[in-house]
Each structure stands twice: as C-alpha cells, then as structure tokens.
C-alpha cells in the first residue's frame, strides 16, 4: 500500500550525538538533486552525564539548532520532512522532554531509531553514492555516541548490521577530557574500544567483506588529517593513523592541534575517533579504508522515496512484513480477508485522520497482516504474543513510533480495551484500532465473506456501524459480539453504536 505521490522536495534531519544535520533534496522519478545541506556541531553526547541525563547546555545547543532548521523548513509539507534521533537520544533518560521541546521549535515530529535501523539507513545512503562495485563491502560509521558496522554487496539489502555503544564524542570526553594527548591516554582509549569490538569481531570477520568504507565525519576527518600531515593521499591506513597519533601526541593537547582542513569542533573529537578507528583496524583486520560522502541523511532521503512507491525503489517495511508473515506461518488468506474489511471501514476516518490518513492506513494494513503471528506460540492470548513479537523484534524500515503504534494495534485487536489506554494518543488512532477489531470480529469464523453488508460512520463524538438487519439475523454470534464490542468501548470513554438497516449496505472496498 504505497503512500500518495511524493512532495517535490524532501528533507532529512539527523540528530546525531556530535552534529545535527539537515539535507534538502528535490525529487523526480529519475534523480535526486541536493538543494541544501546544513550542519550544526551540537555535541549532544558531550552533555550526557554519568546517570545518562542531558545537561542544560547541550539541550540548549540542540534546541537552537533545531530552531534554525525549522526556519529553513518553514512551509514544507509535513509528509516531506523526516527527523530522526540516534544513540544519545536512545540512551538519555530525559530524552522524551528534549524531543517534546525539539518538535515544538522544529515544527515537525522527531523519531528515535534503533541502532540496527541506523546502520541500515547508513548503508542505503552510502551505497547509493558509491559505484556499485563487484566486491562485498563493509561500511563503518563512527558517530558521536555509537559506531555502526554494515556488510553487504552492491545495492542489495545488507546481511550484517551491528551497532556498538562507542563514539568519538563519548570516547574523547572519557579518555581525553583533561585536554592531554598522551601515549597512555591513547592506549587506554584503544584498548577500551578493542574490548567493545570483541562482541562482533567473529561475525564481521566471517561476513566476507573485501572493501572497507568509512561514512562518518570521523572517517572524513581522519582522511583530511592524513593529507594534512603528508602521509597518505586521504586513504586511511594503519601506518598512516600511527603517524597521525604520533603527531597528536607531539602536540600534547587538543587545544594545540592545528590541522588544515579540519574545523575546531571536529578537532575536539578527533582523538576519540582516531582511537576507535585504530582499534577497528586491529580487531577487524582492516588494511585500508576509503572515506565516503554518503550517510544517514542520504539514507533517509532514499528511504522516504521508497515509501512513496517509486518503481526504482522499494519500501523496506513491506519486505519486513512479508518476512515476518513467512517466519511465523501466517494464514495469508485470513490476513487478506481482515485487511480488506479493515481498510474498507477505514475510509470513514478520512477527515478524522487528516494528514495522517496515509500513515494510519498503512499501519492498519500492516497490523492486519501480522495480527495472528502470535498463534505460532499459543492460541490462548495470541494477540499478546503477536504484540510482543512486533514490539520487541528488529523491524528494518520502521521507526520506533511506527513500531510502537503497530504493536498497540495488534495488542488491541481483541479483548479488553483499557490495556491500550496510554498507548494510543488521539481519536484517529482509536478509530484505526476499531477498524481492525471489527474486521477481526467479523472474520472470526474464517469464512470467505468478501462483501460484508456494513459501513462505518465517524463523527467527532461517536462511531456508528451500519449493518444490514437480515445479515445480522443470519449471523447471531456476530450480532452478539458486536453488542459486547459496544460495551467495551464505553470503558475507554468512546461511543460506538450499532445501527441495523433493512436495506443492505456493502462495506467499502479495500483501498
């Protein structure tokens, strides 16, 4: 179920642990044309305390950057903008408060993505800006708070995605906070990084990669620094980094560094990033690495295009849904029945859903396809098992909020409604759940009822289900269940009524 036609301009925002980035691109069916790029050195991870809370200064820097981004984005369609937070916002205990304030000044929603989803998006961004190549490659992205490793071939889906909790800002703060660039500080930083890498070392070595690419600001900074000291042409090598480390130790302090081509904010986090890169070369047996221009923002742009259904792109979410259906042996015929009826009813929510109609309709379709995956565990409470799988599993292509909404719909498909209170935020989401519940209820017998005579009406105050009286009389179990459904909605303060008609009506067709 592709979304409607894409806006002519798309924007991607990366709320990274070191920098916040904004990329604007003009889109047509044949090309992506970059329009503008902005970078703000926020150093969010530098404001993370030992108890994992963002301090006031780092939040102020972040909010100021988002306010400037918001001014640049003013007037863009809400569908055109995708903003994501990465590692620091994954771990900060007060991230929710910062995100709430950030959305207010930016003017658009902000999602927090999981480490592996970040890795996948980086891969998409990097591979689309590199030659296709003939050898499997490893992409390494040393960010401010985490480092991502992705291995794949060409433009295909990567077969290894890992995220490690170490980054240039955190490592610089931890091992070089006193401004001292000493041999012992570097040794401690490198050993700590190698210890972190041991959990993925075997998997990466066995992945079969032949070419290494560095996609982050850290990789580009190291490349520029190697050129500045005259040891390589920009190719990152173990020998070159040893020379660079020696030059940094000779400087003695971060404040004394002077490397042409590197901005002051990048110099501040270069020691930590260099220590991590040296550890990566040693633990993963890397001989050389080339810096790449692509990254998370580029991946977000390509992923947005895929979500709009362009022929040359593919929405990764659809692949994820199909994989889960296959993995958990979903009855595809039953899932299709439920999806068709649910989407037919969903047409009534048009005005109520507003700008979210596309997103909610897609969530409903996905929930219908996955609502029975928990049957592979047990029939009793299967909806709870289904919701747990959806909520806790890796779901490439989905943001954390999309995954949470999907899990809430699957959990609320049957049974008591109070269990999803606090999980659904607005009336349109409750209406979407109602469409799923009614479809599941109507097709409980698993019969081939392709044109059920019913129609859902939605107003700001109530939902009304129009049903053919004759059909109700011939389906007494469904009639009884619908009466109970109306009582259940009262428990969450929502009016749902059944209206029986003598003249039959047909459910609207699936979208």
Image (cartoon, helix red, strand yellow):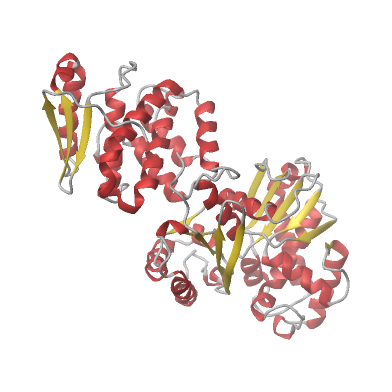
Relative depth, front residue between 404 and 5: 5
Instruction: Decide if residue 24 is in sight here.
Output: yes
Relative depth, front residue between 32 and 151: 32
Above or below for 279 versus 402: below
Please state the horizontal and vertical placement of residue 436, each as a whole percent of the image. Answer: 31, 34
Please state the horizontal and vertical placement of residue 327, each as a whole percent of the image. Answer: 54, 27
Taking the spot 52% from the left edge, 32% from the top edge, the residue there is 322
Q: In this image, 413 relative to 313: left or right?
A: left
Above or below for 323 versus 2: above
Q: Quadrant of the N terminus?
A: top left
Taking the spot 54% from the left edge, 46% from the top edge, the residue there is 310
Q: In this image, 261 relative to 329: left or right?
A: right
Taking the spot 61% from the left edge, 67% from the top edge, the residue there is 170
Q: In this image, 174 relative to 408: left or right?
A: right
The number of callouts visible is 0
Taking the spot 61% from the left edge, 49% from the top edge, the residue there is 120
Please state the horizontal and vertical placement of residue 198, each as a whole percent of the image. Answer: 72, 49
Relative depth, front residue between 453 and 249: 453
């Amino acid at each position: 179920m592709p979304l409607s036609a894409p806006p002519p301009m798309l924007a991607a925002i990366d709320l990274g642990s070191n920098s916040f980035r904004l990329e604007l691109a003009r889109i047509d069916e044949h090309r992506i044309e970059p329009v503008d790029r902005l970078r703000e050195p926020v150093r969010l991870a530098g404001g993370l305390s030992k108890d994992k809370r963002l301090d006031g200064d780092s939040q102020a820097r972040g909010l100021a950057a988002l306010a400037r981004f918001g001014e640049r984005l003013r007037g863009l369609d809400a569908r055109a903008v995708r903003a994501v937070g990465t590692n620091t916002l994954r771990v900060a205990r007060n991230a929710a408060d910062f995100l709430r304030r950030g959305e207010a000044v930016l003017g658009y929603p902000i999602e927090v993505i999981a480490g592996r989803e970040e890795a996948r998006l980086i891969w998409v961004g990097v591979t689309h800006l590199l030659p296709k190549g003939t050898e499997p490659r490893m992409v390494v992205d040393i960010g401010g708070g985490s480092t991502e490793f992705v291995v794949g071939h060409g433009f295909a889906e990567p077969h290894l995605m890992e995220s490690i909790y170490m980054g240039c800002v955190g490592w610089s703060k931890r091992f070089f906070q006193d401004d001292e660039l000493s041999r012992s500080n570097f040794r401690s930083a490198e050993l700590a990084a190698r210890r972190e890498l041991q959990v993925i070392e075997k998997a990466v070595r066995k992945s079969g990669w032949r070419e290494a690419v560095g996609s982050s600001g850290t990789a580009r900074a190291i490349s520029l620094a190697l050129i500045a000291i005259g040891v390589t042409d920009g190719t990152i090598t173990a020998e070159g980094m040893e020379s660079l480390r020696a030059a940094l130790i000779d400087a003695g302090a971060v404040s004394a560094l002077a490397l042409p081509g590197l901005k002051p904010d990048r110099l501040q986090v270069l020691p930590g990033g260099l220590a991590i890169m040296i550890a990566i070369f040693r633990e993963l047996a890397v001989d050389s690495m080339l810096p790449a221009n692509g990254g998370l923002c580029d991946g977000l742009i390509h992923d947005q295009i895929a979500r709009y259904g362009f022929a040359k792109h593919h929405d990764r979410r659809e692949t994820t849904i199909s994989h889960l259906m296959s993995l958990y042996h979903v009855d595809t015929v039953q899932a299709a029945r439920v999806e068709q009826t649910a989407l037919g009813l969903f047409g009534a929510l048009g005005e109520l859903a507003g700008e979210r109609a596309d997103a909610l309709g897609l969530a409903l379709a996905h929930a219908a396809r996955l609502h029975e995956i928990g049957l592979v565990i047990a029939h009793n409470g299967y909806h709870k098992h289904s919701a747990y799988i959806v909520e806790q599993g890796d779901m490439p292509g989905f943001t954390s909020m999309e995954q949470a909404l999907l899990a809430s719909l699957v959990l609320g498909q049957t049974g008591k409604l109070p269990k999803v209170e606090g999980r659904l935020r607005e009336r349109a989401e409750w209406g979407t759940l109602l469409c799923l519940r009614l479809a599941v209820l109507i097709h409980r017998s698993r019969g081939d009822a392709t044109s059920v005579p019913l129609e859902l009406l939605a107003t700001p105050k109530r939902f009304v289900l129009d049903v053919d009286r004759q059909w109700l009389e011939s389906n007494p179990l469904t009639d009884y269940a619908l009466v109970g459904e109306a009582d259940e909605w009262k428990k969450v303060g929502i009016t749902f009524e059944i209206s029986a008609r003598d003249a039959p009506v047909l459910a609207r067709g699936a979208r």
